[in-house]
Image (spheres, rainbow, N blue to C red):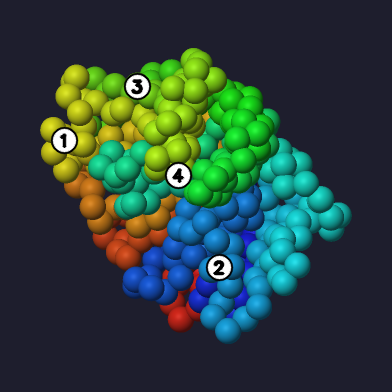
Amino acid sequence: MIRALHLVNFRCFEALNLDLPGGSAVFVGENAQGKTSLLEAICVLVRLQSPRTHRMGHLRRFGTEGFGVAGECWGEVRRVTRGADGLELRVEGEVVESQGNYLNSGGLLVWMGNEDLELVRGPGEVRRRFLDFAAVQLEPTYRRHLARYKRALKARNLLLKERFPDEEQIAAYTTLLIEHGGILQRIRAALVEKLAGPVNEAHSAVSGRREEVGLVYRGAGAGDLAATYAEAAERERRQGKTVVGPHRDDVLLSLNGSAAADFGSEGQQRTMALALKLGQGQLLERERGSAPVYLIDDIFGELDTRRRNALMEFLPAESQQLITTTSIAWMDRESPPLFRVGGGMVSAE
């Protein structure tokens, strides 16, 4: 459980000290008042990443040089600060040098937001991020292989852009892409296979229909990356970039055998997006033995009453759910504690 959150110069918050109940909570307020930033701060504190930006520098309040996020998470005091020298990580007051060690000692999260519709409609990059977010929480070594793959890919692409590239250096980086990329693809393929059952279970619960969700992992060159890079060599020289490998992977999503992006209605696509995140949460719980915290960002305005109720009933009763919304009309009398957000302030109702 997340029991406390402290912010300094994070997004619109100059300073915030917030005690959370030992369970779920709802944050209500108008748009652009900081509701999403609260959930984003928790994501940074627990998983060292934002679902809204790849650049940590964008999280600081305008006109400041850095930010700080701290809180009590699963009984430990954790702190993430970013300044001119980069990130500093602390657990129980002790500096943690490795981001991997910091993450491995933390908890589990599932993020749910309106942008999840892009999981169905959007480009492959969105689905790769979805796989990466889950894989890092399930397999501790995944993050290291992903980071090494990305570094080698960036260096190799720079070489391929040169008029007369150094073939020996390209070959050295290709070896790294094969080594780390092969591991990434094996983990991703296994993850997609494991997700199929939980996603279908969640989809049936939320949709109320017997519809079959298909998830097929399509690895760019999976199975024999060495041969794939050799076959793509001429094309890579023409295009000046690496054209195969895990950075081009995708997950094909179907509903009753038809491509969900092309043939699904908007309601079906939204339900599938919800099912992907709910299935992710179920898999995390099954594999790691404890329910993740669900960060649910303002999704209820896009859902009809039946799907909204089905979603809330499907969420694990023992999980902590931190929810943002612009309206509380959908809430029942047994709703979680309510907090009002506005003007960079948060107050309990």
Q: Secondary structure at mark 3?
A: strand
Image location of residue 117, percent across then percent down: 29, 45
Q: Secondary structure at mark 1?
A: helix
| Residue 16 to residue 224: above or below | below
Query: Mark 4 = which residue?
Result: 240
Query: Mark 1 = which residue?
Result: 262
Q: Residue at x 23, y 52 (%)?
A: 302
Q: Secondary structure at mark 2?
A: helix
| Residue 226 to residue 72: above or below | above
Label 4 neighbourhood size at 10 Å, few (<14), some (14-19), many (20+)? some
Query: Mark 3 = which residue?
Result: 216
Residue 85 in view here? yes
Which sits in the foreground, 5 or 65? 65
Residue 318 in view here? no
Under mark 1, the amino acid is Asp
Distance between the alpha carbons at the discs numbered 1 and 3: 16 Å
